[in-house]
Image (tube, helix red, strand yellow):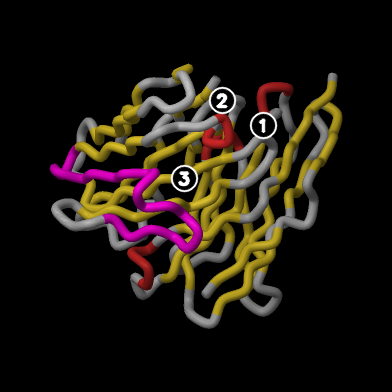
Amino acid sequence: AQSVTQLDSQVPVFEEAPVELRCNYSSSVSVYLFWYVQYPNQGLQLLLKYLSGSTLVKGINGFEAEFNKSQTSFHLRKPSVHISDTAEYFCAVSDMSGGSNYKLTFGKGTLLTVNP
Amino acid sequence: GAVVSQHPSWVICKSGTSVKIECRSLDFQATTMFWYRQFPKQSLMLMATSNEGSKATYEQGVEKDKFLINHASLTLSTLTVTSAHPEDSSFYICSARASLDRGRGGYTFGSGTRLTVV
């Protein structure tokens, strides 16, 4: 079984400031890692994913994340945020071997609020 | 890219009636579909996993007879909330995994359905 911990439920930042949203996971098996964004009353959109290889992955909208196996972390970063980045962000993992149909295990989410 | 169309986007129904939510993969074949429920300001709670042509697998605590899931084709899955009550009011989201994906592509999510039972 896997679990995902998003350490911050809310992160307020000012426009053009950098931001880091933290994610730690626990798993007895190897996992794929994902970050999703959800705007109000909408479904989830994939920001980026780590499958293998380079531990720094780049995604859409200027976001990037770094996989750290020793710390079991997958923190999301953006060097300069915009008002439009205000949304809920979810970290998720799935069992690489296909356990449970590759279902996603989500963290509780982090609400990023970008203020002018 | 892959698109999943979910309808309706919102629905209001009377207590005791049934509501059907559809989820269609528009440009790919979805071997597996997942149905989630999301409460306000909370994460997604997986309700069930459905594979095309098979019975859905429900998560512990989810009533199979209340939440009927059908995945009759590779492009369509439906969730029917039977005899709905106000406590069933929630945001329901589907997601689909492509046949050969093996979990590597992430998942494509529908836009969600806001159900309000009055």
Which label's residue is closer to the chain start, 2 or 1? 2
Q: Is mark 2 on a helix, strand or loop?
A: loop
**B101 w.r.t. A3: above or below:** above
Q: Give the residues in magenta.
A: B56-75
Q: Please rate how many residues cluster around mark 2, counting C-alpha atoms within 10 Å: few if below 14, some from 14 to 19, many from 20.
A: few
In magenta stretch: residue B58: yes
Camera-nearest residue between A18 and B117: B117
Residue B106 placement (x, y as % from top left)? 40, 51
Labels 2 and 1 within one chain: yes
Number of labelled discs? 3
Residue A95 appears left or right of A93: left
Q: What element carries label 1?
A: strand
Gap in Å between the C-alphas at discs 3 and 1? Answer: 19 Å
Residue at numbered disc 2 = A41
**B9 w.r.t. B108: above or below:** above
Subunit of label 3: B
Residue drawn at point x = 62 percent, y = 46 percent:
B43
In magenta stretch: residue B36: no
Residue at numbered disc 3 = B36
Residue A52 placement (x, y as % from top left)? 45, 68
Gap in Å between the C-alphas at discs 3 and 2? Answer: 14 Å
Which-is-in-front pick, marks 3 and 1?
3
Subunit of label 1: A
Quadrant location of the N terminus of chain B in the rendered image: top left
Whether residues under marks 2 and 1 lie with C-beta atoms below 8 angstroms apart, the answer is: no
- Residue type of the residue flagged with mark 3: Tyr
Residue A1 placement (x, y as % from top left)? 52, 75
Residue at numbered disc 1 = A87
Gap in Å between the C-alphas at discs 2 and 1? Answer: 11 Å
Residue B20 placement (x, y as % from top left)? 32, 29
Which-is-in-front pick, marks 3 and 2?
3
